[in-house]
Image (spheres, grey):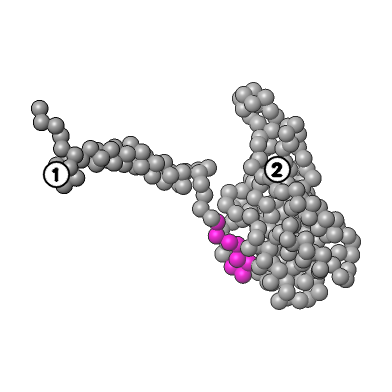
């Protein structure tokens, strides 16, 4: 029998067979797997669009819903753990900077105190969006609209997510410029010992509705609790689906806390 020629200028070369086999059984499946990884839930997500503060009225928002941190019975039996795993792990430096910024925000004179800007600006390197949000609140308090706008813009460009709430008067109209007060969030985390760590908080003093009766704040994208709910103040009505003990979540990047109604 005449042997098969391997002359590259004549007939079929075995190397082409190898290349075709690799393409069919390796390259094509790898391409298909990568494509599905990009689009399937939990796969590699595309880079999210930044939250542009000036366009906040157009942000797609989703209502917050209660979400338990405890595993269901079958999951608990399988893992021997009580709580679900949360894919949320800020750096030690970020936590330290946020804790210092929260301590400043909880000062009774935080909004009016002089000389806090340099330290907050320095903290922004690690505390990120939170320190910039505090700078924005201080600028709003002293009537510097341009500086407040710039600080809010920086905060939301760096924020993983946001929470907002519409403020209404008793007649249903938007309460432009209404003072809301302090709004606080706690982001519970699950420790290696399967316990809840409630130490990570964001506190926003002096929150006020904008010209369209909306307030919006930058937050982490994780399960959270509203530990300083605006509706808890006298003379206000709001969602009764959550309180300081309710753990909440929302799809997307912007969570809607429901309307806040000023009853008087």
The residue wearing badge 2 is: 247
Residue appearing at x 10%, y 31% in the figure: 2
Residue 61: say if magenta: no
Q: Quadrant of the C terminus?
A: bottom right
Residue appearing at x 57%, y 52% in the figure: 252
Residue 53: say if magenta: yes
Task: Judge by depth and name the residue closer to the eye, 44 or 251.
Answer: 44
- Toward the left, the furthest residue is 1
As drawn, 210 above or below 87: below
Q: Provide residue 127's location: percent of width, then percent of height.
A: 74, 57
Give SS at disc 1. loop
Crowding at dot 2, Cα within 10 Å, few <14 / some 14-19 / many 20+, comes out as many
Task: Judge by depth and name the residue closer to the eye, 232 or 248.
Answer: 248
Tell me if I can see residue 236 in this picture.
no
In the figure, residue 159 lies in which quadrant? bottom right
As drawn, 50 above or below 37: below
Crowding at dot 1, Cα within 10 Å, few <14 / some 14-19 / many 20+, comes out as few
Residue appearing at x 63%, y 55% in the figure: 160
Q: Is residue 109 found left or right of 29 in the rendered image?
A: right
In the figure, residue 206 lies in which quadrant? bottom right
In the figure, residue 166 lies in which quadrant? bottom right
Residue stretch in magenta = 48-56
Give SS at disc 2. loop
Residue appearing at x 55%, y 60% in the figure: 49
Q: Provide residue 233's location: percent of width, then percent of height.
A: 81, 56
The residue wearing badge 1 is: 10
Q: Is residue 184 found left or right of 17 in the rendered image?
A: right
Task: Judge by depth and name the residue closer to the eye, 245 or 125.
Answer: 125
């Amino acid at each position: 029998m005449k042997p098969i020629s391997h002359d590259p200028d004549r007939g079929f070369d075995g190397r082409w067979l190898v290349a075709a086999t690799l393409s069919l059984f390796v390259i094509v499946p790898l391409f298909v797997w990568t494509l599905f990884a990009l689009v399937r839930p939990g796969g590699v997500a595309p880079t999210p669009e930044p939250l542009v503060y000036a366009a906040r009225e157009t942000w797609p928002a989703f209502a917050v819903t209660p979400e338990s941190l405890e595993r269901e019975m079958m999951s608990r039996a399988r893992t021997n753990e009580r709580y679900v795993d949360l894919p949320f792990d800020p750096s030690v430096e970020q936590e330290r900077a946020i804790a210092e910024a929260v301590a400043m925000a909880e000062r009774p004179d935080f909004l009016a105190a002089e000389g806090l800007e340099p330290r907050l600006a320095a903290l922004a390197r690690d505390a990120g969006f939170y320190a910039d949000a505090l700078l924005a609140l201080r600028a709003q308090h002293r009537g510097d609209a341009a500086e407040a706008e710039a600080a809010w813009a920086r905060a939301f460009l760096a924020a993983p997510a946001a929470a907002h709430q519409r403020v209404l008067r008793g007649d249903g109209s938007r309460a432009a410029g209404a003072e809301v007060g302090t709004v606080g969030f706690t982001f519970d985390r699950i420790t290696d010992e399967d316990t809840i760590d409630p130490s990570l908080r964001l506190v926003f003093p002096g929150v006020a509705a904008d010209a369209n009766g909306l307030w919006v704040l930058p937050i982490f994208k994780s399960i959270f609790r509203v530990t300083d709910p605006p509706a808890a103040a006298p003379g206000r009505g709001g969602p009764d689906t959550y309180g300081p003990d309710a753990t909440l979540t929302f799809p997307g990047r912007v969570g809607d806390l429901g309307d806040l109604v000023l009853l008087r």
